[in-house]
Each structure stands twice: as structure tokens, then as C-alpha cells.
């Protein structure tokens, strides 16, 4: 990758390693569906003036079907199921399970003929996925299988989202696409959220929701679109191999979550997969 690509990659890995902690805190007092509204509505309102100023909303109506598909795949469905899962799973385990996105994306992109992964990169992805399997086998108990299955739904969505951007929306202004997508999600969840608002929220929950909206949503998606353009849709999903490290550290240090055997043995496998996957061993056909 280029230097700019590496910088975007590292910044996004940190930013999207934080939501697991913030969601874990927020769902103590806010329902998952309400949390999505509280996350998307403020972010959309913040980005809207910027999108209007840049004229970034022109031409979006003609792509409304793909905008809706991106919203469903990347925001509306994944965020609901991640939030539901974190009612039962620790933030560290949830973050590590989402690390199977690159393998899912690699298989999907290759089947569709949009990306070419040689054997070395496929092996890197498999090594990384082995770490996820190790985590599940060691740390996840029978009572947690349901939440684990719920996390698999966002995994598929997070793999599809960058592909939609790269193939169908890449010529549109990123700020316009994400603003409209956030607005769609907030409108979809608004009727439920506005009738299920918590009567009160603690300071830490308010801070978590604000950070989710401002940093992990409004800022993060603008940077993520740049990352997709810079490195391609397949490699952009590899941040989900790195951001669990942030989730682990935050979960252990701030929430006192256990540093389990599955994490200790599974995460190094994932790091090896990252190195192999990011090597420039072939070109990305999407760009």
C-alpha cells in the first residue's frame, strides 16, 4: 500500500476498534434500535451542511437503490445485530468475531470476479480466520451461541458494503453518500427510537453515544471511503483484523473484561493473517 493508504488503514483500525467498548457501555441503558437512531441522526445532521456546501448531494437520487442497499448492508442491519450481541458478549469477543469479515469478503469478491487473491493472500486470510475459530472454540460457551450467530450477520454486511461502494457508488462524493445513508437509517429507526427513549442516561452512556455519533460514525465513514478508494474494497475490510486489538485493550483496561486464552492464542494468528493479506503480491482489479 501507499503511505497514505497505511495512514488511513491505521487511523481507521483505531477508530473502529472503539465502538465495541462504546456500544457495550451504551446498551446498558439504551436499546439497540434506539442506539442506532442516536448514533445516525446526529451524525447525519453534522455532515448535512458540509455535503450541501460541497454540492455532494447532486446525482444521488438516481442511485437510490444502491444507496439503500449500502445502508442496509453497512449500517442498518449490522449495527442492530452487533448491539444486540453485545448485550451478552464482551466487547473484546465481539470485536474478534467481526475479524472474520476479510475472509468473507475475499471469498465473495473472488466468486463474483471483482478481486483476485493469489494463494499467499488466501492463506493469510485463512490463518487469520483460524484465530477467530480458536477464540470461539475456547471462549464462547453454549449460552452465547445465539449472540455469536447474530455477529455473523454484520460480518456478511460489512463485506458487502465496500463492494457496493467500489462498484456502484465510487463516482459519487463520499460525503454525500454517507450523509444520505445515515439519514435513511435514522428515519428507519426513528419511529421506534422516539417512542423508546430511556427516561434517563448516565454521563458515561451519554459520552459513549456522542463518541459513537461524532467520531466512530461521522468522521470514520468519510475516512473509510477514502480508504476504499486508496486500497480497494477487499483490503479495506482487513481493518477488522487489526481493530480487535484496540477493542481488547479498551475492554480489558476500561471495562475489566478478562484476557482469556482464546484471545491470547487467537489474536497472534490474526496478526499473521494481516501481514500476509496486505502484501502487494497482486493488483486490485477494482481500481
Image (cartoon, rainbow, N blue to C red):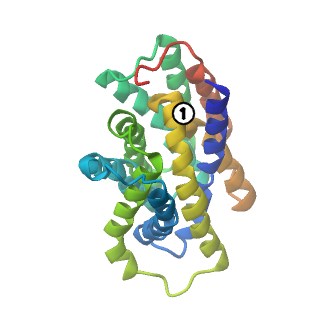
Q: In which quarter of the image is the C terminus?
A: top left
Between residue 118 and residue 247, name the one nearer to us: 118
Q: Give the image quarter of residue 230.
A: top right
Q: Give the image quarter of residue 139.
A: top right
Residue 198 drawn above or below residue 159:
below
User: At x 40% / y 24%, what residue is drawn?
Assistant: 286
The residue that mark 1 highlights is: 238
Report whether residue 237 is seen.
no
Between residue 224 and residue 154, name the one nearer to us: 224
Counting every numbered tag in the picture gives 1
> Where does the image place residue 167, in percent across and percent down from the top left?
34, 33
Residue 169 drawn above or below residue 187:
above
User: At x 60% / y 27%, what residue is drawn?
Assistant: 274
Q: In which quarter of the image is the N terminus?
A: top right
In this view, which residue lies farthest toward the right?
253
Is 196 on the left-hand or right-hand side of 14?
left
Between residue 212 and residue 81, name the one nearer to us: 212
> Where does the image place residue 37, in percent across and percent down from the top left?
43, 69
User: At x 55% / y 12%, what residue is drawn?
Assistant: 281
What secondary structure is found at the residue carrying circle 1?
A: loop
User: At x 54% / y 64%, what residue is drawn?
Assistant: 213
> Where does the image place residue 157, in percent across and percent down from the top left?
38, 44
For label 1, count other residues whose C-alpha is less than 10 Å away and answer few (under 14), some (14-19) or many (20+).
many
Amino acid at each position: 500500500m501507499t503511505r497514505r493508504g497505511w495512514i488511513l488503514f491505521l487511523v481507521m483500525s483505531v477508530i473502529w476498534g472503539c465502538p465495541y467498548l462504546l456500544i457495550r457501555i451504551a446498551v446498558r441503558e439504551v436499546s439497540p434500535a434506539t442506539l442506532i437512531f442516536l448514533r445516525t441522526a446526529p451524525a447525519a445532521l453534522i455532515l448535512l451542511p458540509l455535503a450541501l456546501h460541497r454540492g455532494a448531494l447532486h446525482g444521488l437520487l438516481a442511485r437510490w437503490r444502491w444507496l439503500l442497499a449500502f445502508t442496509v448492508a453497512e449500517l442498518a442491519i449490522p449495527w442492530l445485530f452487533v448491539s444486540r450481541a453485545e448485550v451478552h458478549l464482551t466487547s473484546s469477543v465481539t470485536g474478534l468475531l467481526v475479524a472474520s469479515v476479510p475472509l468473507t469478503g475475499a471469498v465473495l469478491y473472488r466468486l463474483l470476479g471483482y478481486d483476485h487473491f493469489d494463494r499467499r493472500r488466501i492463506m493469510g486470510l485463512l490463518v487469520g480466520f483460524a484465530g477467530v475459530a480458536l477464540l470461539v472454540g475456547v471462549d464462547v460457551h453454549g449460552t452465547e451461541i445465539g449472540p455469536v450467530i447474530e455477529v455473523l450477520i454484520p460480518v456478511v454486511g460489512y463485506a458487502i458494503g465496500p463492494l457496493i461502494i467500489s462498484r456502484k457508488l465510487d463516482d459519487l462524493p463520499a460525503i454525500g453518500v454517507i450523509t444520505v445513508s445515515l439519514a435513511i437509517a435514522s428515519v428507519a429507526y426513528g419511529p421506534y427510537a422516539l417512542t423508546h427513549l430511556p427516561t434517563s442516561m448516565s454521563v458515561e452512556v451519554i459520552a459513549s453515544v456522542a463518541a459513537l455519533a461524532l467520531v466512530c460514525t461521522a468522521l470514520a465513514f468519510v475516512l473509510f471511503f477514502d480508504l476504499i478508494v486508496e486500497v480497494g474494497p477487499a483490503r479495506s475490510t482487513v481493518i477488522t483484523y487489526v481493530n480487535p486489538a484496540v477493542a481488547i485493550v479498551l475492554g480489558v483496561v476500561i471495562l475489566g473484561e478478562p484476557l482469556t486464552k482464546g484471545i491470547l492464542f487467537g489474536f497472534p494468528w490474526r496478526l499473521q493473517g494481516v501481514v500476509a493479506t496486505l502484501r502487494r503480491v497482486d493488483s486490485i482489479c477494482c481500481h
